[in-house]
Amino acid sequence: EVTRSPCVIYTYGLSPFSTEAIALLKGTGAKFETIELGPEWFLLGPKASVKRAELEAMTGQSSLPHVFIGGEHVGGLATGPGLAALQESGELSTKLSSAGAT
């Protein structure tokens, strides 16, 4: 699932961090796939809760969003290193380009 698009972001709809991460990706002009797990973390159904647990086991990160570029987990908005730090350092556009997202 994390490799079916050059950039994949797992979100939940009412998360301001998810909203900001999506806006940041849109601002780069990148092609990305959004997988919304539910409207809010405490409203996740059984299937979405399992997916969130799988993402945590895979990445060590429990919070959403989860962003994968070229199949590599880059964190969330501000975690692990996160989209914001990658954007600030200039690495985000390189990663997106290398993955074929731009």
Image: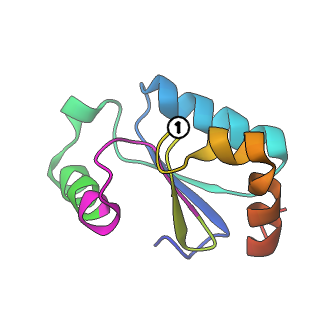
Image spot of residue 32 (x, y percent): 67, 57
Image spot of residue 97 (x, y percent): 83, 67
Q: How is the image coloured?
A: rainbow
Quarter holding the C terminus is: bottom right
Residues rendered magenta in the picture:
55-68
**Which element carries disc 1, helix, strand or loop?**
loop
Q: Residue at x 74, y 53 (%)?
A: 92
Q: In the figure, 8 relative to 76: above or below?
A: below
Is 76 situated left or right of 24 in this image?
Answer: left
Residue 102 among those drawn in magenta:
no
Image spot of residue 35 (x, y percent): 47, 53
Q: In the figure, 16 relative to 71: above or below?
A: above
Q: Nearer the viewer, residue 18 or 79?
A: 79
Q: Nearer the viewer, residue 14 or 85?
A: 85
Q: Residue at x 75, y 58 (%)?
A: 31
Q: Residue at x 28, y 47 (%)?
A: 62
Residue neighbourhood size for the residue with mark 1, other residues' Cα within 10 Å, grouped as few (<14), some (14–19), many (≥20) = some
Image spot of residue 81 (x, y percent): 54, 49
Is 84 situated left or right of 27 in this image?
Answer: left
- The part of the image, by quadrant, that contains residue 30 is bottom right
Q: Amino acid under label 1?
A: Ala
Which residue is the extreme one toward the left? 46
Q: In the figure, 44 relative to 17: above or below?
A: below
Q: Which residue is mark 1?
A: 78
Is 94 situated left or right of 43 in this image?
Answer: right
- The part of the image, by quadrant, that contains residue 20 is top right
Q: Residue at x 23, y 40 (%)?
A: 44
Q: How many marks?
A: 1
- The part of the image, by quadrant, that contains residue 100 is bottom right
